[in-house]
Amino acid sequence: MNNKVIICKNCIYDSSMPTVIFDDNGVCNYCLLIENLKNQYKTGTKRGEEDFKKIIDEIKLAGKNRPYDIIVGVSGGVDSSFMLHKSIEWGLRPLAVHYDNTWNTSIASENIRKITQSLKIDLYTLVVDNKESSDIARSFFYANVPELDGPTDIALAETLYRAASKFKIKYIFEGHSFLEEGISPLTKAYIDGGYIKDVHKKFGRIKMKTFPNMTFFSFLKWVILYRIKKIRPFWFIDYSKENAKNILMNLYDWEDYGGHHLENRMTAFNHSVYFPVKFNEDQRNNTISALVRSGKMTREQGLMEYNKPHYVENGLVEYFKKRTNISDEEYEKVMKGEKKSYLDYKTYKKRFERLRPLFFILAKANLVPMSFYLKYCFPIKNNK
């Protein structure tokens, strides 16, 4: 048997990833996916900008005679902060919406305050009870699954939809760029509201009262009944995270927090400690591969960056253990223990797959992200 690791000719994804397939030229299926998305959205071209301009005009028309015409989810990170800056530049009246999982760094909180106050943008924040947030994190830790920070993604999405409904706003901007961040491969990592409910039911110690979970039917309510559209502007226009960062620092005294996913301590622990130590997975390959594909970094530079040790904030592990009330012994036991996945718990995955034709229509109408359709609505093909 040939166990030689094959590395994509165009990025740094390799054959150790269960869902990677290489074509005859040695290029991985994720590079081909990105090329298809670039062609579909005409990313960074005049046609892409024109298509996005039409969306801006639709948004302004829909928001006429209302105080806001767009929602922008904010985290204090570079992408969402720059999205607020661009929204004003595009002549929109954004409402900034933040889901506070109570694990924010002070830098992230200050960044949100600085840019919303400077641009005179109203901020709507939903704060989960900190004990409840800690209990959910503890539950996923004891569930032995990779999605330690997955509940934050679901809660943010639900918070954005609730705010849109409350203020009668039909459009949500998301600051994702597949050119800068890629599309995360769906291997062992997955999250939905049913998954969160099942894991917490099995391992939680207190009731979920303030956590904004998204059930399957609330998801359908937001996208079919309320028809709230999610738009990713950076999928249409040219976007550079580095340029955005420089603009934010110069105009708003925005502060860099040290790296992708490090603006929140839960996310930082998940990506810098939990994933690489327990699951031997390094999600930096998503962003690095994206930069190599786009020519912003050579393949050799990417591999060199990928092989550097993770930056771990001093005291981060101790902070996680204290927040979740996990002893040193229990922490070590779980970190070295069994590895499970969403397949071991109840989820909505099969429902999404059965309703794939519906979600394709919704994705084409911008009612769900195209990345949701591509990742969640197909069975996983494991090449191992």
Image (tube, rainbow, N blue to C red):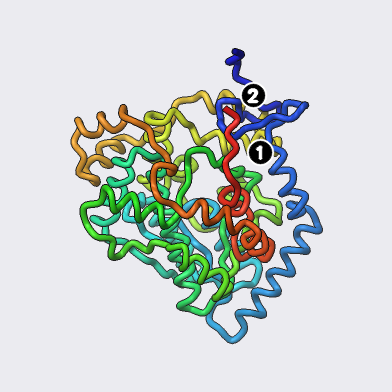
**Quadrant housing residue 341:** top left
**Is 383 situated left or right of 58 in this image?**
left
- The residue shown at (57%, 41%) is 380
Above or below for 205 versus 61: above
- The residue shown at (23%, 55%) is 131
- Mark 1 or 2, nearer chain start: 2
Q: Amino acid at mark 1?
A: Tyr
**Is 115 situated left or right of 182 in this image?**
left
Between residues 311 and 280, which one lies in front from this camera angle?
A: 280
**Image coordinates for residue 90, horizontal then vertical, percent:** 66, 68
Question: In what element is the residue under mark 2?
Answer: loop
Viewport quadrant of the N terminus: top right
Q: Is residue 247 visible?
A: no
**Quadrant housing residue 266:** top left
**Image coordinates for residue 205, horizontal then vertical, percent:** 21, 52
Q: Is residue 109 visible?
A: yes
Q: Which residue is mark 2?
A: 7
Viewport quadrant of the C terminus: top right
- The residue shown at (70%, 55%) is 237
- The residue shown at (39%, 56%) is 110
Real-space CA distance between mark 1 and mark 2, rounded to the nearest whole angstrom: 12 Å
Q: Which residue is mark 1?
A: 30
Between residues 164 and 383, which one lies in front from this camera angle?
A: 383
Question: In what element is the residue under mark 1?
Answer: helix
Q: Amino acid at mark 2?
A: Ile
Classify 10 Å Cα crowding around label 2: few (below 14), some (14-19), many (20 and above): some
Classify 10 Å Cα crowding around label 1: few (below 14), some (14-19), many (20 and above): many
**Image coordinates for residue 362, horizontal then vertical, percent:** 64, 64
Above or below for 332 versus 348: above
